[in-house]
Amino acid sequence: MHYDLIDLNKDKNNPAYMICYKGVPVYLANRYLNKYMNPKTIEDYARILIRFFNYFEDKYNLHDYRKINRPTALDDYMRDRIYKKQIKRNGKIIYLTTDETNITQQTAKKEMTVLQGFFIYLDALYQFNIDSIDPEFIKRVLDTSDAKNKLKKHKESYYGDIWRIRKLSKLPCIIQGIKWKEKSKYRRSFTQEEITILESNLFSIRNKCIFLCSLEVGARISEILTVKKKDFIQNKQEHWVLRISKSKSNPRWVFIPEYLRKFIQMYINTERKQITNNSSKYPYLFVSTKGNTKGDKISYYTYRNALKKSAENGYLDPKDICTHMARATKSTRMKKDHRSNEEILKQLGNKTELKAYIDFDNPDMVIPVGTSLYNIDIK
């Protein structure tokens, strides 16, 4: 498999993903991806395309994706992707039919849409010599029959034939006896026993702090990992607070209980200090300790893997544990304690623009909420 995804910037905060073949950027595929603005979308779509390109390279010894001229290319790929497992036997790749699909129906639909969009893009470039195609154009072609007719079949072009093959677009489970793989289901919150097990099996102070922050503060993991050291402060009433921000427009300050404050300061004075020496060059509170990202913020995947490993060490099923459950646990506790919706929104934040926390970018406003949540007496 020679197609691969490379981050040219090698910066998880500002990635520049590019599909490469043997280290050389693949021009048209990357031009298609660059129509999308969100780095996560680009990464997801790139991995789908790479899997598709490598499939044809392995199965048909076809090294150049532009030469895929099988009208049923998408159907062939999706059928093997959904129903068959790829294994090597005597140096050759073979596909064995399974009792359960390899991917969920939602994943299959997403992959089909991305691949059809890519071939619509190639088809339009070939026919109209268009320099730039907006992603909305591709969406309209997929969604409306009128738009489809605008791209006429071209006898010299096979791209239009490929994306028009829609036998699996609804992705029915057509092979008798095979069921769709079920989407992973998580329980909403942790039990107290699980919290104890997970905390005791998170061996680094950093990972333990992140877990306790998500549990006590109720912040999203993505919010916690982007907290900067300067956002951990003592306010005018001498209570420790943390500035949480999902976006620049909606930051909020949350109260930190005393035991968690001690944990965070222990981390700052030990593990973090060994990496950063408390230099302002490293702004993030929770930093990576290894590799090229040493001193940068810890990645979501690093923390998630640590959490699942702690579950495994504690004889819990890692499949039943996800990072969001700590935030959900906090929300559930607040509901059980009969906290008002306004208090919950101020503590947890919300995607909707509600007046309850629009003006909450003020560390000194934490006290009323912190007081009611943790029963602190203010004199």
Image (cartoon, rainbow, N blue to C red):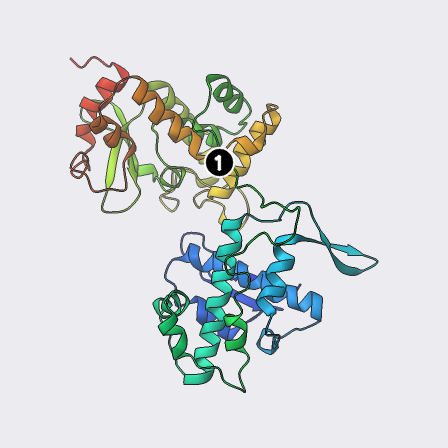
The amino acid on which the numbered mark 1 sits, given as a three-letter code, is: Gln
**Residue 378: which quarter of the image?**
top left
Q: Is residue 351 above or below residue 94?
A: above
Outermost residue, right side? 90
Q: Is residue 340 left or right of residue 209?
A: left
Q: Which residue is mark 1?
A: 274
- Say which residue appears at 29% left-offset and 17% top-offset: 337
Q: Is residue 229 left or right of residue 269?
A: left
Outermost residue, front side? 176
State the count of labels.
Answer: 1
* Image location of residue 182, percent across then percent down: 55, 41
* Image location of residue 363, percent across then percent down: 20, 32
Q: Is residue 158 above or below residue 377?
A: below
* Image location of residue 186, percent across then percent down: 49, 33
**Which structural element holds mark 1?**
helix
**Depth check: 13 or 266 in front?**
13
* Image location of residue 319, percent across then percent down: 56, 34
**Depth check: 218 or 244 in front?**
218
- Say which residue appears at 39% left-offset and 44% top-offset: 282
